[in-house]
Amino acid sequence: MTLRENQFDELRELIGAISEDRLTADQAARLEQLLGEDEAARWFYLEYIDLIGGLHWEGAAERESPSLPPVPAPGLPVDLLQRGMDFGSRTTPFSLIVAGLALGTLLTVLAFWAAPRYFRNHPQPDLQPAVTYVARLTRTVDCKWSDRRVPPMPGDFLHMGRMLDLEAGLAEITFDSGARAVLEGPAVLVIESVGGMRIESGKLVVNVPETATGFTVRTPAALLTDLGTEFGVEVGESGATRLCVFKGAVRVDTEEAPGKVVRAGQAVHVETALGIAVLAAPVEPERFARSRRALADNAGQGERFRGSYDGSYPPDNPPAGRDRWIVAREGSGRIVPNSDIGRESPGVASFLDKGGNRLQVFRPHSSEDWGSNPATVEYEFHARLKIGKKTKTQPDQSWAYQVFGFRDEGGEGRIVALGWYYDLKGGGPGLALIGFSAKPLVTVNREDHADGRFHEYRVRKYLDRGQIKIQVFVDGVARLSPPALYSNLQDDSERSVGKGFGLFSSNVAKPLLVVDYIEYRVKGGD
Amino acid sequence: MTDPSRTEEFVRLLTLHQRRVYVFILAQLPNRADADDVLQETNVVLWNKFDQYQPGSDFRSWAARVAHFEVLKFCGRRRKGVLYFSDPLVEDLLTMALARADELDARQEALAHCLTKLRPRDRDLIRRRYSPGASTKSVAHGVGRSVDAIYKALQRIHDTLFQCIGRTLAKEGAE
């Protein structure tokens, strides 16, 4: 039997549905029938899925950063890399290591060959949307997000146009203007600007300080403008909007009834079914009790994100001449535009922030920039791994402790730690295979933890008086630091050597594979 | 696996065939997040059992079989109808995918070329849709259009790419 032309059309429709994972049972049965009957249909299916799969694969490797430097072998402190860049033809430890690692070179060539080609050769800078971050997700409580793959996490930056689809739980959003909102799932919200948001459905409680007066909440039925206040909004399936004002006042504008001011202790219901009408309603504060409690409990929580080094907001008063700064727990770093990379001095950490800027944290003795400014920088990454035969990371939570790059997540991104894995008990090597999507593909050699349970690993890496130190926590319990592999490297990296190998694509942010870890020792440093 | 040369061999083969294995998983398990998970698990098995792999034998075929088994295990664990096809059909698809793997590889090469031919607007839509974590719904919100409109636009672009791949390969064949 041979498929007719219209059956190919039908097949295409069904494949479209299956690729969107929205195939119904009836459609699945029909697809099975078509594919089962005809070899041409099976080949057509494979060709089409191959196309979709190829786009997924390419997409995961997109947003490569051609300006990023080559990747050091795993374990190599990033400032070595920076030295290698800055001093050009000088023989650097990195170049020595690379030259000595025939295997690494082979693998790198292989990786380059294997890396997705379209996006590598076509950076498409014109396609990079301008992204403006105007808020952060400052707290989540029992949140279940519709996006299971890359769920939002506390500390995430939120850009204009960002949609949050919360199925359950409470999520606090803090705008740059100072306005704070607690969303209660199920709810769908879109960040519109630094001064406003749109709620499609669900509940929201908003607290607007004086500095943010004029903050707006758009609903399908009305535009709510803050007049210095705290209020709750609930949007039903039909778009009907209920507004309860707890403090201050809110102006309610609809197409048919502009400019109604609702004051503290009042509530209105904006109906859409019979034309838009603003009706008085009982206040019913209990409808928003949970969100209001969360809002009150969480005052100032946003600050804590400045305490860990995650590319956090610049402080309120950046020093003159510094465009953007970040502040870590006891020190500071700064964000510099991408175009400035080559001219910057070595740093101990170097990666991209969510705006695509290159982020560098300078080591204390960098005379080029920081002079003797004692910067002590800490950064932490959290991960949950299931160790054992079924090793797997939880979605979106990368592990490891060496920072290599930046993970893009549909228009925004987060800094990720990529690299290898320590045997946290014995100090021996671990192994990690990391895929295009910055997600470890394999972690093995973990016999010590092969109990099949999830463990939470936190690796804190910090700089202390010129030395990188590492502190590991397993399930919240501090472990002894791994051997002092990095001791003295900062001060005398020219004399250090290493071994090991890694496999990387041309994209610094997405190592294909990192196997083993680098051991360092200092030549003649006994 | 402690022999460095064996590790090297594993790395080489895995890298070479990773994409093909991924697409094969996707053919059975269209949900991308599920496919990613199965790919991870497949790689774990490949790594753990690499000692059993005979050098010089067909790694791609072996990896595809392992992947298929992992798909079945995954679906069994999830206990829901994430697997759309019957076993005989999946077997047929697997056999065909392996027999014509070179043709599929050629199609991937052509895809890279065809992406460059897309109109900027279509390319932008593809970029948005296939970014990690993106969905048709998120793209629709991002560009301010309905989900249905984006779905149809993507189908049109897929068709365009599909036809372009066919033309490109035909042209190469003629040359």
Image (tube, coloured by chain):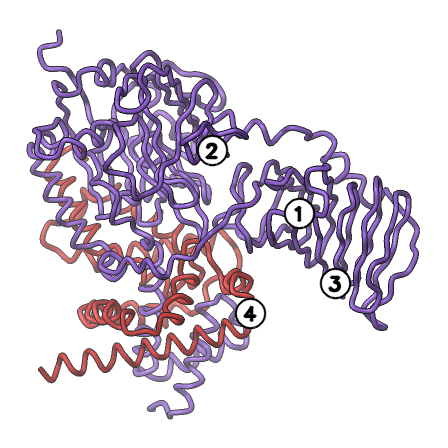
Chain colours: A purple, B red
Report helix, strand or loop for mark 3.
Answer: loop
Which label was assigned to residue A168? 1
**Residue pointed to by mark 3:** A237
A462 w.r.t. A306: above or below: above
Disc 3 chain ID: A
Write down the quadrant of residue B7 in the picture.
top left
Between residue A305 and residue A4, name the one nearer to us: A305
Write down the quadrant of residue A299 in the picture.
top right
**Residue A313 at x, y percent in the picture:** 50, 34
Q: Amino acid at mark 1?
A: Ala
- How would you rate the neighbour count of disc 2 (Cα within 10 Å): few for under 14, some for 14-19, many for 20 or more? some
**Residue pointed to by mark 4:** B145
Residue at screen point 37% across, 72% down = B89
Which label was assigned to residue A454? 2
Disc 4 chain ID: B
Left or right, A474 with respect to A279, comes to left
To the question of a shared chain for discs 2 and 4, the answer is: no
Question: Which residue appears farthest toward the top when viewing the image?
Answer: A526
Q: Of callouts 1 and 3, which one flags the residue occurring earlier in the amino acid sequence?
A: 1
Residue at screen point 82% across, 63% down = A258
The quadrant of the image that shows the C terminus of chain B is bottom left
Residue at screen point 67% across, 42% down = A170
Between residue A267 and residue A10, name the one nearer to us: A267
B69 w.r.t. B156: above or below: above
Disc 2 chain ID: A
Q: Nearer the viewer, mark 3 or mark 2?
A: 3
Q: Nearer the viewer, mark 2 or mark 4?
A: 4
To the question of a shared chain for discs 2 and 1, the answer is: yes
